Amino acid sequence: MRLFYVSIIAFFLCIIFSCFRNAVFFATRLEAQTQQEFLSYSAKKFIAQSFKNTCKQKGFQNFEQWQQACKALFNLESISYETYSVEKNIVYAVWEGSETLKKCSGEVYYRLTQRGMP
């Protein structure tokens, strides 16, 4: 009878440890996804806010400096800006994230005031 009990206990321990291993694997994978989402959100927020600050003549001196810094900092595939509108008072920026930060891609518009023109 003892061998039977030992076999049953060993079987249940294998099932418990297998479930524990799977739980740790999924928790690790979920942590990596959460970290990726946070990095993408932070990058998108920084790029958009720094673009608005550059339009207000705060932070970066001009759009080229902003463009180069963001591209180097976040390893972006592409980043560009242009003046958009008949009155030429709306500035538009668009960027595309690299493979690691694909969800970082975005765009931002900013309406320039007369005194806020870069």
Image (spheres, grey):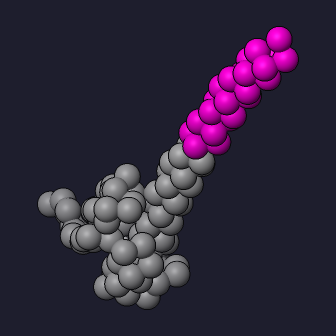
Q: Residue at x 48, y 71 (%)?
A: 50
Q: Residue at x 38, y 62 (%)?
A: 100
Q: Residue furthest top?
A: 1
Q: Along the horizontal axis of the image, is 81 left or right of 74?
A: left
Q: Quadrant of the C terminus?
A: bottom left
Q: Nearer the viewer, residue 62 or 88?
A: 62
Residue 47 percent across, percent down from the top left: 44, 67
Residue 22 percent across, percent down from the top left: 59, 36
The quarter of the displayed image where residue 7 is located: top right
Q: Along the horizontal axis of the image, is 42 left or right of 90?
A: right
Q: Which residues are magenta?
A: 1-27
| In the depicted structure, whether residue 2 falls above or below residue 42 | above
| In the depicted structure, whether residue 73 falls above or below residue 43 | below
| In the depicted structure, whether residue 54 falls above or below residue 39 | below
Disc tally is 0
Q: Quadrant of the N terminus?
A: top right
Residue 21 percent across, percent down from the top left: 63, 39
Q: Residue at x 50, y 55 (%)?
A: 36
Q: Residue furthest right?
A: 2
Kindly tell me whether residue 80 is visible in this rendering: yes
Q: Nearer the viewer, residue 24 or 3?
A: 3
The quarter of the displayed image where residue 97 is located: bottom left
Q: Is residue 10 magenta?
A: yes
> Magenta stretch: dominant SS?
helix
Residue 69 percent across, percent down from the top left: 41, 83
Q: Nearer the viewer, residue 92 or 12?
A: 12
